[in-house]
Image (cartoon, rainbow, N blue to C red):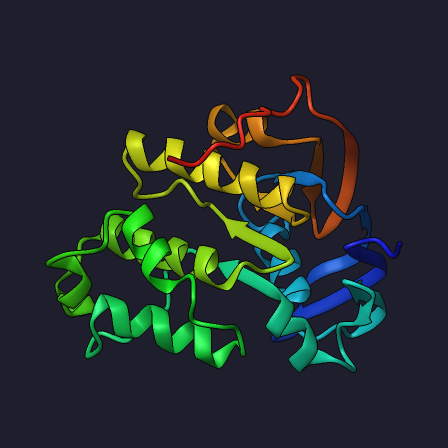
Amino acid sequence: MAPAVLLRAVVALTGRFPALAGVDLTVEAGQVVVLEGANGAGKTSLLRVCAGLLPVTSGQAEVLGLDAGRHVRSVRRSVGLLGHAPSLYDDLTVFENVRFSVRAAGSGEERVEEALALFGLDGRLRRTGAARLSAGQRRRVALATLVARAPQLWLLDEPHAALDAEARELLARVLTAAVAGGATALIASHEPASSLPLADRVVSLAGGRVVASGPAAAPRRSDAHVA
């Protein structure tokens, strides 16, 4: 089986700046890998390369067995990215945002209602316009979209930001269940207390390169139950 992510000497530019300056990284299918490093280390850029949103200037980048540069559409359909600021359409309701994103990704809609209920976005919130949501609620909508899409590769950039304790625990259970079902996850986080219990490996970045990689200090949680 091909690795979920295979990066070899990857260079990627943001403007003229080398956001990635020769990254080597292999993530096997079914792994949860936490990316750590200071601001500007390259964590977000690495996730964007894996999502097909940041082109590679040189090197080899394969995602789910596909060349990330030549098969951008196929890559984007199979990965789910949670960025710093959830991309919602303020003139659409919560339900409409999730349904639109699922349709745009070419996924079926059968899990939309379940995902909304899971994150407490049913009832009145289901019909609420995104412009009226708090930061935490917007984050929940983005997470509900990932659950509804059920991507093969989860790319989470600071996923715990703006989430309360209950939502953080729910995220942990949802992600654990997704990985138990065959998904792979890359998590960029400044909050090791929240992210490391989910991890198989920790990868450290600095200056757009991988500078260290090793197993997580504690074994990944095995609780895959989602209430």
Residue 124 falls left or right of residue 108: left
Spot occupied by residue 7 in the image (x, y as percentages of width and height): 82, 58
Q: Quadrant of residue 74?
A: bottom right
Task: Let me know if residue 210 appears in the view.
Answer: yes
Query: Is 209 or 123 nearer to us in this picture?
Result: 123
Give the answer, above or below, for where 111 lies relative to 220.
below
| Residue that appears at 65% across and 81% down | 73
- In the foreground, 113 or 22: 113
Q: Residue at x 42, y 71 (%)?
A: 109
Q: How many marks?
A: 0
Query: Which one is nearer the viewer's eye here, 30 or 212?
Result: 30
- In the rendered image, which quarter contains the C terminus? top left
In this view, which residue lies farthest toward the front?
110
Expressed as whole percent of the image width and height from the top left, the position of residue 187 reads 58, 44
- State which quadrant residue 93 falls in: bottom left
Q: Is residue 18 in sight in this rendering?
A: no
